[in-house]
Image (spheres, grey):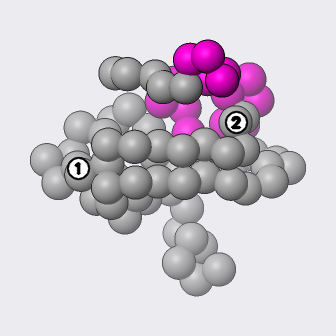
Amino acid sequence: MAETAKGGPFTEIVESDIFINCIYLTSKIPSFVDEESLKSPNRKLSVVCDVSCDTTNPNNPIPIYNVNTVCTSTFIYS
């Protein structure tokens, strides 16, 4: 897609309120968002919903946390 051809991290994600990730990851891709991009003064991002849940995958495109939530613990605060 033209919108993602340049690769990440994407300022558009950090400057959005909510990011929902639901990709099927088959190979290494640039991170969508990383710790450095979260330091942006234009950051509005406060909720990440990671349906794909690739935290244990070495190619994880959202390397900003490393634990998964479960039904009894549905949030990670940072």
Name the residue rendered at 46%, 22% in the picture. Answer: 76
Q: Which residue is mark 1?
A: 43
Is 52 placed left or right of 15 in the picture?
Answer: right
Say whether residue 72 is magenta: yes
Instruction: Point out the image quarter for the C terminus.
Output: top left
Whether 55 is drawn above or below 23: the answer is above
Residue 40 relative to residue 67: left or right: left
Q: Position of residue 57 (x, y in %)?
A: 76, 29
Label 2 vs label 1, nearer the camera: 2
Q: Residue at x 31, y 48 (%)?
A: 45
Amino acid type of the residue that numbered disc 1 sits on in the rendered structure: Arg
Q: Are marks 2 and 1 in contact (CB under 8 Å)?
A: no
Left or right of residue 11: residue 29: right
Amino acid type of the residue that numbered disc 2 sits on in the rendered structure:
Cys
Q: Residue furthest front?
A: 72
Q: Which residues are magenta?
A: 55-73
Give the quadrant of residue 35.
Answer: top left
Q: Which residue lies most toward the right here?
A: 26
x and y, in percent, of residue 10 in the image: 43, 58
Residue 5 pos. (x, y %): 59, 73
Q: Which residue is at 17% across, 54% downward?
A: 42
Neighbour class for label 1 at 10 Å: few (<14), some, many (≥20)? Answer: some
Badge 2 is on which residue?
Answer: 53
